[in-house]
Each structure stands twice: as C-alpha cells, then as structure tokens.
Amino acid sequence: MTRIDFYFDVLSPYAWLAFERLPRALEGVSHVVAYRPVLFAGLLAHWGQKGPAEIVPKRAWTYRQVAWLAARQGTALQLPRPHPFNPLVLQRLALACADAGGTPNRRVVDALFRHVWCRDSADPNAPDALAALTVRLQPRRDPQGAEVKAELRTLTQAAAAAGVFGVPTLRAEGRDFFGQDGLEMLAAMLHGDAWFDGPAWDEAGVQPPGVQR
C-alpha cells in the first residue's frame, strides 16, 4: 500500500479541486492518504514568492481557470468572498480534529473545503458559520490552544524545509507532485509508468540554471 502525503491549505481552490478528484485519479491503486494542513502564506514567505491572487492579471486568470476546471471535472465551486482570506482558524481546526501528532481524516478535510468552496460565495470566516462548523466537527483539542498553534507552525516549517513550495503538494515514494494538474502524473507513477523507472525524473530535476534574478 502506497502512502500519500497531501499538503493542503483550504485557501487554495486548486487544493479543493485536487482533493475532490483524488479518489478517481487513484482508482485501482492501493493507497492511504495522510492529509497535512499547512499555511500557504508560510510557504510563500519561505520561498520569497507572491500568491497568484496578489498579481492582478494572474488573479483574474486564476479564478477563471478554477471555475472552468471545476465545471470540467464536475466539482462544486463557489468563489468565497473575500478571497484571499485568512485561513488560520480553519487550518487549526483541521489539526484540532486529529490526535496530537496525527492528521485529520478525509471527512474532516472535506467539511473544511466545502465550508470554503461550496457555500454560495459566503465569507469563510463569518463567526456564526465558523461556530457551527466547529460544533459539527467536534474537535478533539482546542483549535485556538497553544499546542495546535505550535503544531501548525511546525508542520508548515517542516514542509518548506522538505521542499514543499505550494499547495496542493502530494508526496509519494519520495517524489512530490504539485497542483491539481499533477494528479495525472502521480497516478501514472503509481500505475507503473515506465518513464519513472528511467533517468528522466532525476535528470530533469537537476537542469542547471541560466539567468538568475
């Protein structure tokens, strides 16, 4: 059975699309998924990047693309308002629903993503909605407790140190696959695509840089 680490932040529409499509992408593959909450903003800060919504023309393209991708794969998606928003409370809630050192299960992660992306353009941080979601999920630990806060920071820092630069990232068999469009590549490897047995993966990853800014 293959273990897959799914690094996510509910802020990301691509993470929602990948999460929703993952079971279909991996049909026929014996696997178990560990859902790992991280803060996308922390990854961006580590690598010195801006998020797509912080670049004006890319922002418009991102929302158009995810709306089209959602329609194409049959996934419900309503853009929340505002977006981007601060996902800190929701990411802490994800961790609080697991035992210390554990990971939230798919039911919990599904509820969090749907809270953001399937509520008719609602504010994900509206107090009443957050309170109702917390009651429904019945976290094992205090989402705002020092333990959970420290755990989320540690997970984000560890992910960045291990080379995770964005969400969603799926890690399997020592390889990272980034983005909703990385699912096809991940599935190919797990189904035994011979390309992954040759030198192409390693050779492509050590391409020497040219101009650097």
Image (cartoon, rainbow, N blue to C red):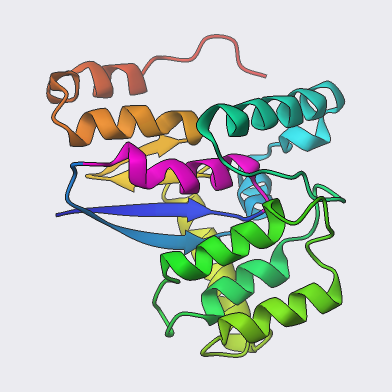
Q: Nearer the viewer, residue 76 or 40?
A: 76
Q: In the picture, which quadrant includes the C terminus?
A: top right
Q: In the picture, which quadrant includes the N terminus?
A: bottom left
Residue at point 60% right, 55% down? Answer: 9
Q: Nearer the viewer, residue 76 or 196?
A: 76
Q: Position of residue 111 (x, y in %)?
A: 58, 66
Q: Is residue 199 above or below residue 70?
A: above
Q: How many marks?
A: 0
**In which quadrant of the rendered view does residue 153 lie?**
bottom right
Is 174 colored magenta in this rendering? no
Q: Using the rendered image of the protein, determine whether residue 144 is visible from the camera's viewpoint.
A: yes
Q: Is residue 14 above or below residue 112?
A: above
Q: Nearer the viewer, residue 2 or 145?
A: 2
Main SS of the magenta part reads helix
Residue at point 46% right, 36% down? Answer: 178
**In which quadrant of the rendered view does residue 35 lie?**
bottom left
Q: Left or right: where does residue 76 sit relative to residue 197?
A: right
Residue farthest to the top, as pictured: 210
Is 12 colored magenta in this rendering? yes
Q: Is residue 90 above or below residue 135?
A: above
The magenta span reads 11-27
Q: Position of residue 24 (x, y in %)?
A: 35, 41
Q: Using the rendered image of the protein, determine whether residue 163 is visible from the camera's viewpoint.
A: no
Residue at point 86% right, 27% down? Answer: 56
Q: Left or right: where does residue 198 sit relative to residue 12?
A: left
